[in-house]
Image (cartoon, rainbow, N blue to C red):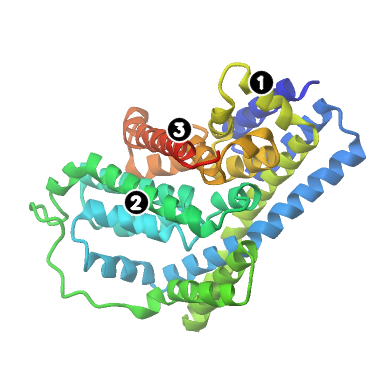
């Protein structure tokens, strides 16, 4: 079977099985890789070899980063230090909406998972508001975590894109654009939900938060993040590549978190962190298997040729990522597969690397609905119905995606020589 119809059928099967039976993404993605490989006519031995290579490549790229982030998250959670971090931020930011958004934005980066950040923050955010205001605060925390997780390097979304597509450009140059854009998007989300500032706080009055004692800084809670930042110049001085540097700085954060933890928190945090990281890593490895088989089949050329038949080549990365995101819901899976497909293609040679990555990221934002696992987590936390979720989650993310895409187009037009 030709790659395009085989791919379309595989995505339909994966989506149906994942939604209908709630099977682990690892099994649906590896099963999808086998299914697609058979449809594409790959020899059985070659198919298994490609799947194994895809699994190993992604494991090597993500294992240390995700495990370190999960350990940091669980160790901090065990000791109540996430609440201390939020308390420190509250010393500078009193508005509950801004506090929720900034907390989600910041926490999603070191823990390397937007869902983990939201789950950790949920009980803390619940102390900032009531009823409708609480639902809005939870939505803002979720959106804040997704904005940084989807845009800022290094996260599991941006790492494969930077490794595969950011050729000849420093990751720092990308982050200058990405961090600026992500903060503007967060400010826009807060502006849209600014009515929360007028909602009653937990004390039932018009005050944003109940009276509190003077804030006290908690350096132990911030130590893992400080270690990550301090490890950056050390790694640069040692001449580490961007990929190696990410592994080292995340490991430095995890080591610092465990070293400063109490014995009981250290044991529990390591155990819970390893368990949580294992689930995430295996799911992403499944995406690597599917991406490797897709690439082996010659899908990249066929897909870009098909898109070029009805749309300009410059928008192909955005459309491809949007299709994958809509079909299976995981931003990391979308990034892994799209990066593998686009690397070395005409689109990658035509579009500036920073603009190219932004186009893919934009595609991961535009249709976050029933296939998106985060959609259901936020729905459960807020108690919102589907219409409210579309208004408070799907549409704001779609707006962010369109803004990111327009920014990528503007960059492409402004950068000379591209």
The first of marks 3 and 1 along the sequence is 1
The first of marks 2 and 1 along the sequence is 2
The first of marks 2 and 3 along the sequence is 2
Disc 2 from disc 3: Cα separation: 18 Å
Residue 131 - label? none
Q: Position of residue 94 (x, y in %)?
A: 18, 60
Quick check: 388 above or below 155? above
For the residue pair 376 and 113, the one nearer the viewer reads as: 113
Does residue 35 appear to the left or right of 165 in the view shown? right
Quick check: 308 above or below 317? above
The residue indicated by pointer 2 is 183
| Quarter assignment of residue 35 | top right
**Residue shown at 22%/54% (left/top)?**
96
Secondary structure found at label 3: loop
Residue 44 shows in the view: yes
**Residue shown at 41%/47% (left/top)?**
147
The residue indicated by pointer 1 is 306
Residue 126 shows in the view: no
Tell me the crowding category of disc 2: few under 14, some 14 to 19, or many 20 or more residues within 10 angstroms, Cα based: some
For the residue pair 296 and 36, the one nearer the viewer reads as: 296
Quick check: 133 above or below 268? above
- Which of the two discs, 3 and 1, sits closer to the camera? 1
The residue indicated by pointer 3 is 366
| Quarter assignment of residue 64 | bottom right
Q: Position of residue 300 (x, y in %)?
A: 71, 32
Secondary structure found at label 2: helix
């Amino acid at each position: 079977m030709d790659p395009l119809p085989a791919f379309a059928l595989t995505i339909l099967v994966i989506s149906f099985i994942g939604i209908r039976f709630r099977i682990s993404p690892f099994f649906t993605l590896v099963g999808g890789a086998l299914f697609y490989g058979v449809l594409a006519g790959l020899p059985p031995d070659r198919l298994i070899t490609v799947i194994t290579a895809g699994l190993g490549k992604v494991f090597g790229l993500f294992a240390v980063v995700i495990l370190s982030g999960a350990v940091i998250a669980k160790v901090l959670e065990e000791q109540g230090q996430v609440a201390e971090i939020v308390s420190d931020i509250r010393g500078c930011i009193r508005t509950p909406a801004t506090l929720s958004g900034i907390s989600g934005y910041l926490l999603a980066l070191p823990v390397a998972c937007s869902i983990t950040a939201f789950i950790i923050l949920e009980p803390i955010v619940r102390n900032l508001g009531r009823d409708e205001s609480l639902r809005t605060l939870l939505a803002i925390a979720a959106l804040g975590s997704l904005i940084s997780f989807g845009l800022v390097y290094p996260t599991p979304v941006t790492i494969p894109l930077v490794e595969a597509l950011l050729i000849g450009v420093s990751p720092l140059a990308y982050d200058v654009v990405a961090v600026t854009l992500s903060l503007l998007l967060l400010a826009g989300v807060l502006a849209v939900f600014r009515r929360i500032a007028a909602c009653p706080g937990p004390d039932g009055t018009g005050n944003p938060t109940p009276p509190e004692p003077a804030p006290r800084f908690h350096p132990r809670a911030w130590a893992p993040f400080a270690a990550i930042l301090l490890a950056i110049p050390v790694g640069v001085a040692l001449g580490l590549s961007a990929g190696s540097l990410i592994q080292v700085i995340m490991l430095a954060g995890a080591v610092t978190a465990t070293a400063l933890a109490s014995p009981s928190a250290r044991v529990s945090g390591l155990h819970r962190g390893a368990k949580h990281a294992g689930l995430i890593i295996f799911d992403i490895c499944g995406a690597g298997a599917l991406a490797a088989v897709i690439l082996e089949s010659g899908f990249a050329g066929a897909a870009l040729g098909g898109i070029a038949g009805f749309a300009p080549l410059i928008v192909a990365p955005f459309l491809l990522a949007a299709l994958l995101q809509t079909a299976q819901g995981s931003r990391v899976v979308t990034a892994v597969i799209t990066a593998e497909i686009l690397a070395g293609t005409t689109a990658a040679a035509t579009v500036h690397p920073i603009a190219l990555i932004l186009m893919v990221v934009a595609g991961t934002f535009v249709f976050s609905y029933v296939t998106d696992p985060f959609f259901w987590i936020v729905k459960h936390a807020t108690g919102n119905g589907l219409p409210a979720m579309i208004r408070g989650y799907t549409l704001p993310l779609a707006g962010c995606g369109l803004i990111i895409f327009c920014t990528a187009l503007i960059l492409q037009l402004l950068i000379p020589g591209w």
